[in-house]
Amino acid sequence: MSEAGSSDGYDEMSCSQEDTSDPEEEIFDSEPIRQQTQTFTVLDASECLALAQKEVDEVRELLCCSEEVASILMRQFRWNREKLTEEYLCDADKVLKRAGIHQGENLEIVHADGAVAVGGTSQPRGSLPDVQCLICYETSADYSALGCGHQFCNTCYTTFLAHKITDEGYNCVFATCPKPECSLVVSERLVHSLALPADKRAIFDKARRIERSYVDDNPNLKWCTAAGCGNAIRAPKGHLGVKCSCGQRFCFKCNDEDHAPCSCEELAKWMVKCRDDSETYNWLMSNTKACPKCATSIEKNGGCNHMTCKNSSCKFEFCWVCLGPWRIHRAGSYYSCNRYDPEKEKENPEAKKKDSSRAALERYLHYYTRFTNHHNSLKFEVEARAKMEEKIKEMEKQGDKTWIDCTYLKDANEALYECRYALQYTYVYAFYLPQGGNFRTHFEMNQTELEQQTEQLSEMLEKDVSEIHRAEVVHCFTMAKTRLTNLLELVAVRGSGSATDTSGGAGSSSDP
């Protein structure tokens, strides 16, 4: 429980009684509940390389081409082997030309190991005749060419490729012959024969690695967004939230943080709206509120929204979010903290003086305060997770429990974080939902149940270790995970994102 002063007497607050099974026998997993029904795979660098090499080898055998040609073709077709095979069998010449692969007589000139390879045949280095470079127009016998035969001195070729690598980064693998009308892709052999600076060559070599292309150019794969993590995520088209084995969660579609259940478009509009209301944002970011009964200043120092006034003559229990009495937030009571009630505006005698923009701001503030509250509460949950090992050690000292016996607290904290994390975005989703309708009613009902369960779990985990009971905690966090699953499944059935409301309510064109 979060409060400015000390309090007790909340042991009677229990979790929902809908599930009557023995909580000690319930099976639970610390893996976030959202990932249990999602079909994505985490791949490390070696797995990406193995999968990419397997694809290249199969294409090489199928099309009877070299490994280099197979790699270029797979990059060109964004690792869609079916499409490549279909088009290649229909018109191989067209596919090879489009990919910048040389056909016909090989006129390649590459210097290596004191010799020069002309058309694949090694000759003494001094055997080349002098030619005029097509860039600097200087005459030289130290020049190179691709299979197309367009000859450039090695100095100009090196400068050209260095600029390509600098300007295009990893896309330098698609660099073509310096002659403007030629589309032949520069070969790895030619690049390695030139005296490129070490940093430029390192970039080129990294870009040429097929596992990088396998992820970068594949619409079903993305690198983990965590700094320093080399893992990739494979997910089907249209997939949204994913979690890497390193712990990083992000949206597979927009690369932003995971924002289920709201869509990428809704989140983008929401963030713009939040930035535009800068003064409102600054006011809402305050961590201090007045007690609704005696006006004593209260500071929130935990993730739980159950507050108790520190004034000894008051001790009023209220909700940090809506400032209403906490008794209406208990399980089994009517709970409306998550709902925006436009009727409240009508009850206010000053409401008639408000113009439409003020009414819109009031509605926005309802959802924003709840979004921000859960977002800020996450900071406390993170701190609680960091202190969990200390709490587990303390529980070991107080009885005959082992570390394994107490790890359910880590599972509970993980579930709490997942629920709190999702709840913040449920308010973004609700903001853009059309007013009225059965779906909105069902959504808010599920949101209410999840929020109640989350607050109960948060309050349980903030108790002193002597007041924590394993059976109650396991039951509570298992129910919280079930509530979260129910809400996300409800949204999934309806479809990702909200329907546009043309009635001037949520999701109307007036909402940026």
Image: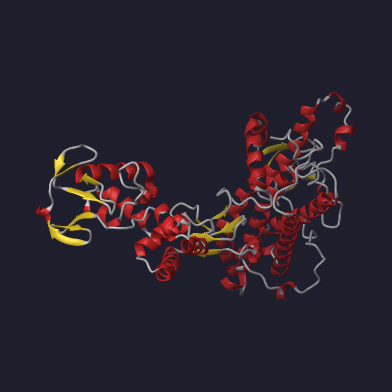
Q: Is residue 465 above or below residue 100?
A: below
Name the foreground residue: 182 vs 265. 182
Name the foreground residue: 152 vs 78. 152
User: Which residue lies at the image location 89% right of the left edge and 27% below the top edge?
Assistant: 349
User: Which residue lies at the image location 43% right of the left edge and 65% below the top edge?
Assistant: 52
Image location of residue 170, percent across then percent down: 39, 49
Image location of residue 402, percent across then percent down: 58, 73
Left/right placement of residue 173 relative to residue 432 reads: left
Q: Is residue 274 visible?
A: yes
Left/right placement of residue 5 relative to residue 177 reads: right
Image location of residue 149, percent across then percent down: 25, 50
Q: Is residue 388 above or below residue 299?
A: below
Q: Point out the residue furthest to the left here.
A: 126
Q: Is residue 18 above or below residue 212?
A: below
Figure disc tally? 0
User: Which residue lies at the image location 76% right of the left edge and 39% below the top edge?
Assistant: 366
Name the foreground residue: 433 vs 148. 148
Question: What is the quadrant of the C terminus in the image?
Answer: top right
